[in-house]
Amino acid sequence: MASSFSLAALGRAARNAVRALLVLPMALLVCFASPAMAAQWSADQLTVPATPDGTLVTFNEQEIKAGRKVFNLSCGECHAGGITKTNQHVGLDPETLALATPPRDNIEALVDYMKDPTSYDGEYSIADVHPSLRSSDIFVKMRDLDDDDLRLMAAYILVSPKVQGQQWGGGKIYF
């Protein structure tokens, strides 16, 4: 009886070891795959409005990834996934950005907002309560950002709904 128990346990251990040896190379491939093996974003996904008049600009994947990093470090605390934690009705989805006054659905307008934010209706400055370059004395995360950082963050904000779909700005059902 004791020998059959130990043989069964030994058999299970051997099967588990074989499975681990078969799964390990696949896990390493996923973790350390080269960028060339990663899914490529299309030019359409990487092309967004640069100015209010509709002039387009195309970013590359490295720029979007850099914009995501700066966004997550500077804005992600309140805007994770394109939502606005302090006001669930005003997110960073394309429809909401387009309906702001002035519309914030292009790179130039988003950079302007990050420099000196206004209320959604554009009536007054909210720089004293919203991080911006204008209020970098209060919001220290904004101190080290330059125009290129702001441009890359704006690109990330505008590309995200094209890549993530409804999840960008979709709220807590996705996060």
Image (cartoon, rainbow, N blue to C red):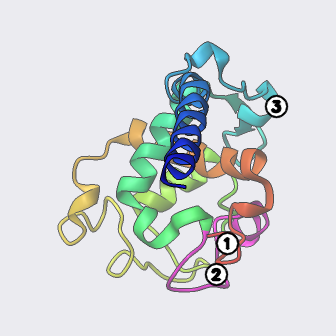
The residue lying toward the viewer, choosing from 56 and 159, is 159
Q: Give the number of the disc on residue 101.
A: 1
Looking at the rendered structure, the secondary structure element under dot 1 is loop
Quarter holding the N terminus?
A: bottom right
* Residue located beneath label 3 in the image: 44
92 magenta-colored: yes
71 magenta-colored: no
Question: First in sequence: mark 1 or mark 3?
Answer: 3
* Mark 3 or 2, closer to the camera: 3
Residue drawn at 50 percent across, 61 percent down: 113
Crowding near the residue tagged with mark 3, few <14, some 14–19, many ≥20 C-alpha atoms within 10 Å? few
**Would you identify the image quadrant in which residue 143 lies?**
bottom left
Q: Are marks 1 and 2 in contact (CB under 8 Å)?
A: yes
Segment tinted magenta in the rendering = 83-100
Crowding near the residue tagged with mark 1, few <14, some 14–19, many ≥20 C-alpha atoms within 10 Å? few
Which amino acid, mark 1? Answer: Thr
The residue lying toward the viewer, choosing from 53 and 69, is 69
CA separation in Å, label 1 and label 3: 26 Å
